[in-house]
Amino acid sequence: MVNENQLVQLKEIFGTALQENVRLSNFATMNVGGTCDALLVAHSADELAHIVSNLWQLELPVKILGSGSNLLISDKGVREAVVVNHAHNIKINSKHEQITAWAESGALMVTLGRQLALRGMSGMEWAATIPGTVGGAVYGNAGAFGGETCLSLISAEVLDRLEGRSEWPCEKLDFTYRSSKIKRSVSEAVVLAATFRVERGDAKTIQESIEKFKSRRLKNQPPGASVGSVFRNPPNDKAGRLIEAAGLKGKRIGGAIISPTHANFIINEGGASAQDVLDLLVLARNTVKEKFQVELIPEIEVVGEWDNLTDFLQKPKTSQAVHQ
């Protein structure tokens, strides 16, 4: 919790840039969530590093928000200091033999993928369909249509509370399926920017691939306010298939519904609470476990204050919240 003394110190450091008692549903794609005590917006990687470093010095827990997907915020809100990451600069270096794309962590993967396509750069067509940010993609090893962050990433600039600001090669991030060393660690670290490898290609072919991916996504994934896929796919199976086979497709609690189009999505049809969504998550996981002896692992982050947060949804506390 941000106490009165810390708020005074934050006002001294950040002045009018500090916002208090901000409703976080405005920053989440599910459109649910309570308030935070203190909120700051970062407009560059340098500003993000400056803000986070000062928050750490004040011994404040930090929650970083990017595009707000893959994130379920409690109705009671969060008591950490929240940093909204709007650092979105992108630079494409095509003058060397190895062509690279550098992007700040708040840049949208969709924007990065489209800018590369416009320049006839190939290798990240899949990124043009990812709704989250570069930081979130690095944090969670995002991927789609056979592409993954770990396959394209050269390095990431990381601010680590113990190590300071440095460049982490891809190997140091120790990627696994939808996870990274930063996501798994209990230490505090924030992705500031990332560098990806790309290559020259045929602009028409690249655009055709992106359009094909977009069509597949629109066909298979439901519209509406959601957090995206809620569970990881288990080995050799699909979370959506298991939830549907458990008879839960179309199941509703309050204003939230397990999508009739794709059972691995929960949609806010209007007026849903975060608790409605959590209750559906718990129901889906428990029912699949009971019927098929498969334990679904959440792909989303559940953050904030909860009265009855189920143990299986709890994650190690880190200052690096979801960037997506």
Image (cartoon, helix red, strand yellow):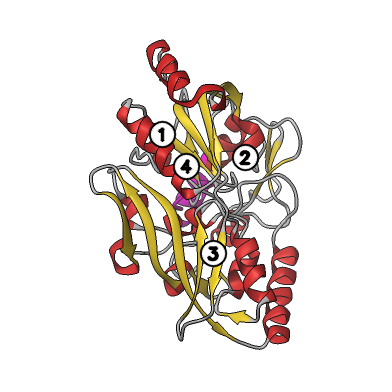
Using the image, tell me which numbered label, if any, was put on residue 47. 4
Identity, as a three-letter code, of the amino acid under mark 2: Ala
Looking at the image, which residue is at 33% across and 41% down? Answer: 316
Which class describes the residues within 10 Å of circle 3: few (<14), some (14-19), or many (20+)?
some
User: Residue 141 placed where, x, y %?
Assistant: 45, 62
Nearer-the-camera pick, 177 or 1:
1
The answer to whether the residue labelled 1 contacts the one labelled 2, judged by CB atoms less than 8 Å apart, is no
Residue at the outermost left position: 162
User: Residue 297 placed where, x, y %?
Assistant: 44, 52
Q: Read off the residue under disc 1.
A: 62
Q: CA distance from mark 3 to mark 1?
A: 34 Å
Say whether residue 57 is magenta: no
Residue range of the region highlighted in magenta in the rendering: 282-298
First in sequence: mark 4 or mark 3? 4
Using the image, tell me which numbered label, if any, was put on residue 238. 3
Q: Is residue 98 above or below residue 271?
A: below
On screen, residue 91 versus residue 307, left or right, reads right
